[in-house]
Structures are given as C-alpha cells and as structure tokens.
Amino acid sequence: QVQLVESGGGLVQAGDSLRLSCAASGRTASGYGMGWFRRAPGKQREFVASIMWSGGLTAYADSVKGRFTISREYAKNTVYLQMNSLKPEDTAVYYCGRRGGSGYDLWGQGTQVTVSS
C-alpha cells in the first residue's frame, strides 16, 4: 500500500523560500505522476503544480509560475516543491497527490505553509 507523506512546511516571511517534500512509501512509485495542491482558509483546494514520473513534464498554476518549481527524484519516490518569493496569499495547507489513470486518487495528510507580511 502506497502512502504519501509531506514535509517542509512552516512559518516564513514574505519573500522567503521553502521546499516541500512528498515521499511515497510502501512500494515503487506508481501512477502517472504527482501533483501539489493547496487549500487556503475558507477556500476550495486548488491546483498548484504537477509532474509526470516519465519524462518529467510539468504544469503550474498561473499564480505560482516563475516562483515555484516542482521536481522529482524517482529513485527516492519523492517529489519536491521549491517555493521562492513567497507571498501572504500562498498561505495554505499544501497537499501532494498521486495522479492515477482516473485522476488524483491518493493524498497525503498535508503540511501547513504560513507566510507573514
């Protein structure tokens, strides 16, 4: 059974950087790829970035393009989200998800990112 475990969240100031990690445990990385989503207080969960295991094709939400970078380390079954130039509006719980054949079918527990102004 595959489990996703996020880490790396915290409290930072505007303009700072953080790197989130999502480690898939249980067995070799499965699915087509991985994605990061976030949910801010009072808002719905929104897409942030995604990456395919094979080929490394990436996609980003417009709100994070140029500031966030998603990457993968296949040998460690781990996906990272490097977040630079953080803004208060980036404050949210960040979740990683596994993208299977029918969409995202497995989620981590989330990690809190708080950006103070």
Image (cartoon, grey):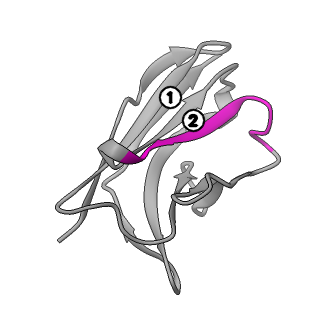
Q: Nearer the viewer, residue 83 or 56?
A: 56
SS for callout 2? loop
- Tag 1: amino acid: Thr
- How far, Cα to Cα, is label 2 from label 1? 5 Å
The image position of residue 53, as x and y in percent, is 51, 58
The image position of residue 104, as x and y in percent, is 49, 74
Where does label 2 land, which residue? 91
Residue 70 painted magenta: yes
- Would residue 107 appear left or right of 27 to someone viewing this image? right
The image position of residue 79, as x and y in percent, is 44, 44
Q: Which residues are magenta?
A: 63-74
Q: Nearer the viewer, residue 9 or 72?
A: 72
- Tell me if label 2 and label 1 are in contact, CB under 8 Å: yes
Relative to residue 49, is residue 14 depicted above or below?
A: above
Quadrant assignment for the N terminus: bottom left
- Residue at the image position 65 percent from the left and 23 percent from the top: 86
Q: Nearer the viewer, residue 37 or 71?
A: 71
The image position of residue 36, as x and y in percent, is 54, 52
- Tag 2: amino acid: Thr
Relative to residue 106, is residue 37 depicted above or below?
A: above
Q: Nearer the viewer, residue 94 or 42?
A: 94
Quadrant assignment for the C terminus: top right
- Residue at the image position 44 percent from the left and 20 percent from the top: 11
Residue 18 painted magenta: no
